[in-house]
Image: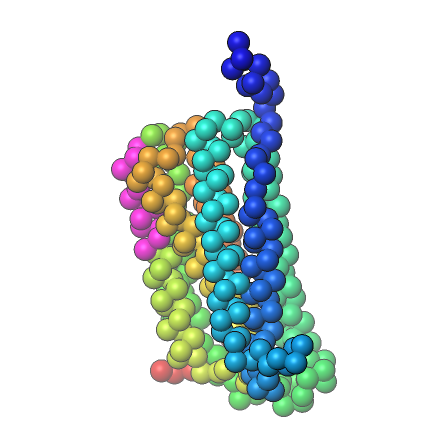
Amino acid sequence: MADAHAKPQHDYHIIDPSPWPFIGSVGALIMAIGGVAWMQSMRSGSLPLFGIDFAGAKYWIFAIGLALVIYTMIAWWSDTIKEAHEGHHTRVVSLHLRYGMIMFIASEVMFFVAWFWAFFDASLFPNEAAQVARAEYTGGVWPPHGIEVLDPFHLPLYNTIILLLSGTTVTWAHHALLHDDRKGLVWGLALTVVLGVLFSFVQVYEYVHAPFAFSDSIYGATFFMATGFHGFHVFVGTIFLLVCLLRAMRGDFTPKQHFGFEAAAWYWHFVDVVWLFLFACIYVWASSGATIAVH
């Protein structure tokens, strides 16, 4: 009788008091201070604050903040997984988790819209970009004078095929899970993780051998910011899927309850779609009529 009265008679879950929002906020603040100190020291070599020069400790400040943020993420998501195993992720709770992931991806869409906006503003109106920056940045044309661009049908096309294949393998893993095929789930996730790592290696190689630098022109700045942030999202998505792979091998997911994997799959498909726009606009369209670098 006591258990019956103690058990909630609704589909909502009131979480226990958690320290993670506060600890995560403190870690983010410390990491931001470390980042500002890092950039300021690169500019002037010092960061005086309260009579103390923090420039020498910039790496430690940033590392401590980053460690707190990573620890918070691991602990907080571990608590969420524990709640799921305890049966707290009811139909209503699961629906709200999906709403939260959808809103997060929507915010990421707007994040990339900003970088595409910057790229098209500079590429479609190169004369205005030259006036705002320096005339030699564009020469009134796009790509700017003197800039050799990457061949879009070499490494970029290779990476496009890799990401499209990874979208196929993560979908295979999802269908395998829905049909309770554990072997297919593990193999699909493992192949997706391998393809994600391969994409990152190819992009790093491309950056190392790029014929232009970030500071060369507005072309280099917009190129590296857009593709670089996408590369970071691929890195995060690969870790996301690796965690799902470990959980799948542990038997955490069931055909009826697997939102952690579903969220990772949504995120990965979002990364795929963003890359297709990057490939079509920044690699293919922007290289039309430009000088292709030969390696």
Q: Is residue 190 magenta?
A: yes
Which quadrant: the C terminus? bottom left
Of all residues shown, which one is farthest toward the top?
A: 1
Of all residues shown, which one is farthest toward the front?
A: 51
Q: Which colour style is shown? A: rainbow
Q: How many marks?
A: 0
Foreground residue, 262 or 43?
43
> Where on the picture, by quarter, is residue 145?
bottom right
Give me the residue at 51% from left, 28% from top. Answer: 88
Give me the residue at 39% from left, 38% from top. Answer: 174
Report whether residue 181 is seen: yes
Q: Main secondary structure of the magenta part?
A: helix
Q: Is residue 191 magenta?
A: yes
Foreground residue, 252 or 38?
38
Q: Position of residue 183 (x, y in %)?
A: 27, 37
> Where on the picture, by quarter, is residue 141?
bottom right
Q: Is residue 120 above or below residue 1?
A: below
Give me the residue at 64% from left, 56% from top. Answer: 110
Q: Position of residue 104 (x, y in %)?
A: 59, 48
Instruction: Give the residues in magenta.
Output: 181-194
Q: Tell me: 22 left or right of 74.
A: right
Give me the residue at 52% from left, 76% from top. Answer: 57
Q: Position of residue 172 (x, y in %)?
A: 36, 41
Q: Position of residue 286 (x, y in %)?
A: 55, 73
Q: Is residue 4 above or below residue 273?
A: above
Q: Is residue 69 above or below residue 79?
A: below
Report whether residue 289 is seen: no
> Where on the picture, by quarter, is residue 160?
bottom left
